[in-house]
Amino acid sequence: VQTRVDIWQNPLDPALYDQAGGSYQIAQGMFTMADGGVLGSGFGQALLSVGGTQILPAAQTDSIYALFTGEAGLIGAIGLLLIYLLFIQRGMKTAIIARDAFSKLLAAGLTAVFALQVFVVGGGVTTVIPLPGVTLPFVSYGGSSVVANFILVALLMIVSNHARAAEQTQGGVI
């Protein structure tokens, strides 16, 4: 744990940068995001290799946000975060309109898990918090993560559907 905290606090420290399991991935993610600028370099055009050496290894995992920021720029990164915020807002609205306590807790809990994933990956890649290795929902590579997030969305949709159906039978409009 101490190594992860040291890497988080000093990602450009040469001693940490060069060691196995060190800060190379985080530092290269920072360079990739900076290379994207405001408008990005274009999809598929991010600086990925120099002289045959891959700049951002394992970019499809938890560093996908750095690669996306490099390709879509600051504008694209903010856009992706706004999409996540919209999803989180709709999940919390579902929790508010749910009729029974279980549905309220289920919707709020699932939305909180989703929001936590987004915060942890976004914060970890931008070095706001230590990077723990969590996937970015619906963006990172990983079959089980995608399946789990689709189940999360399906459960939220079921809760929302039941809440809206109950509201319509009582004569209210949502």
Image: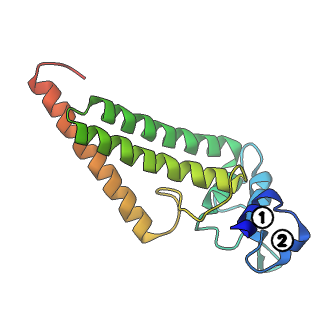
Identify the residue at image location x=53%, y=57%.
Answer: 136
Residue bearing the label numbered 2: 16
Amino acid identity at mark 2: Leu
Report the disc number at residue 154.
none
Q: Where is residue 140 in the image (x, y as percent from the top left)?
A: 53, 63
As drawn, which residue projects farthest toward the top? 172
Identify the residue at image location x=35%, y=57%.
Answer: 150
Q: What element carries label 1?
A: helix
Q: Can residue 124 be seen in this view?
A: yes
As drawn, which residue projects farthest toward the front? 2
Q: Position of residue 149 (x, y in %)?
A: 39, 57
Residue 108 higher or lower than 114, as above or below: above
Q: In this view, does 123 lie to the left or right of 117?
A: right
Q: Quadrant of the image for the N terminus? A: bottom right
- Give the image's coloring scheme: rainbow
Amino acid identity at mark 1: Ile
Residue bearing the label numbered 1: 7
* Location of residue 151 (image quadrant): bottom left
Q: Earlier in the sequence, mark 2 or mark 1?
A: 1
Q: Where is residue 26 in the image (x, y as percent from the top left)?
A: 74, 63
Q: In this view, does 148 lie to the left or right of 46?
A: left
Q: Quadrant of the image for the C terminus? A: top left
Q: In this view, does 109 lie to the left or right of 74?
A: left
Q: Is residue 71 visible?
A: no
Q: Position of residue 22 (x, y in %)?
A: 77, 73
CA distance separating discs 2 and 1: 7 Å
Residue 165 higher or lower than 26, as above or below: above
Q: Do the residues labelled 2 and 1 touch (CB within 8 Å)?
A: yes
Q: Is mark 2 on a helix, strand or loop?
A: helix
Identify the residue at image location x=24%, y=42%.
Answer: 102
Identify the residue at image location x=59%, y=53%.
Answer: 120
